[in-house]
């Protein structure tokens, strides 16, 4: 029974994701279906204004031009099983900052100008993490280097070296003791 409900739940989630991906072209071009030259638009009791863009359709052009790629990138990030999927965080950050800018600053002349500075900060964190993961995977799977095994082997070598030094000290003491007798 549990397996059947798990399969059903997974089917529903994957179906919703597939439907969301399928309707992204409609969402992307949604601004074309809005009334032309309108400064406000009401949908389901919610009033959307032009937000200093001049027209509601232009505002939605900016919003959905950022939201749709962001949505697709987030789906890709969540469903990816590749080792480099953290690199997808860079364009996610870029579109997030651009969407935030479009929603808050509402000046079409200033959209997509300064977000690069924020993206550079995110990139400076993400790239070393991705490179570190890649380095670990390449060392282990391509070169056959197992760092844990190497650490264990180095520890054993250190212990052997310490034992050898102790044995030399004991032998030296034995020689000194035998000379005194």
Image (tube, rainbow, N blue to C red):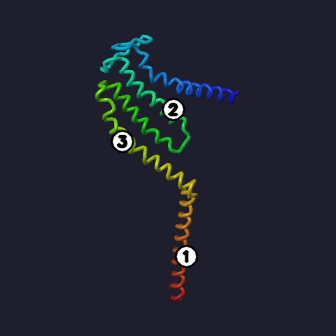
Please give the name of the residue rendered at 39% of the width and 21% of the height, measured from the top-left corner: 60
> Is tag 3's residue or tag 1's residue first in the polypeptide sequence?
3
Q: Tell me the element at label 1.
A: helix
Instruction: Mark 3: give few (<14), some (14-19) or many (20+) Cα within 10 Å.
Output: some
Distance from disc 3 to disc 1, alpha carbons, whole Å, reads 57 Å
Q: Are marks 2 and 1 in contact (CB under 8 Å)?
A: no
Label number found at residue 75: 2
Distance from disc 2 to disc 1, alpha carbons, whole Å, reads 62 Å
Indicate which label's residue lies in the foreground, 3 or 1.
3
Q: Does residue 129 lie above or below 37 as drawn? A: below
> Is tag 2's residue or tag 3's residue first in the polypeptide sequence?
2
Q: Quadrant of the N terminus?
A: top right
- Along the line of sight, which residue is nearer the eye, 82 or 172? 82
Please give the name of the residue rendered at 54% of the width and 57% of the height, measured from the top-left corner: 147
Indicate which label's residue lies in the foreground, 2 or 1.
2
Q: Which residue is mark 1?
A: 167
Q: Which residue is mark 3?
A: 120
Q: Residue furthest right?
A: 1
């Amino acid at each position: 029974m549990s397996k059947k409900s798990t399969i059903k739940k997974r089917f529903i989630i994957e179906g919703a994701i597939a439907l969301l991906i399928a309707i992204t072209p409609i969402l992307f071009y949604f601004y074309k279906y809005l009334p032309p030259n309108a400064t406000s638009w009401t949908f389901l009791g919610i009033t959307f204004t032009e937000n200093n863009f001049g027209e509601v359709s232009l505002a939605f052009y900016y919003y959905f031009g950022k939201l749709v790629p962001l949505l697709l990138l987030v789906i890709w990030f969540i469903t990816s099983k590749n080792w480099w999927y953290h690199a997808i965080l860079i364009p996610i950050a870029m579109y997030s900052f651009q969407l935030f800018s479009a929603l808050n600053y509402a000046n079409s002349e200033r959209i997509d100008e300064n977000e690069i500075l924020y993206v550079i900060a995110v990139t400076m964190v993400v790239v070393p993490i991705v490179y570190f993961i890649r380095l670990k995977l390449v060392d282990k799977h391509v070169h056959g280097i197992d760092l844990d095994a190497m650490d264990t082997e180095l520890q054993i070598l250190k212990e052997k070296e310490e034992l050898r030094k102790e044995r030399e000290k004991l032998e030296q003491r034995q020689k000194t003791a035998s000379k005194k007798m």
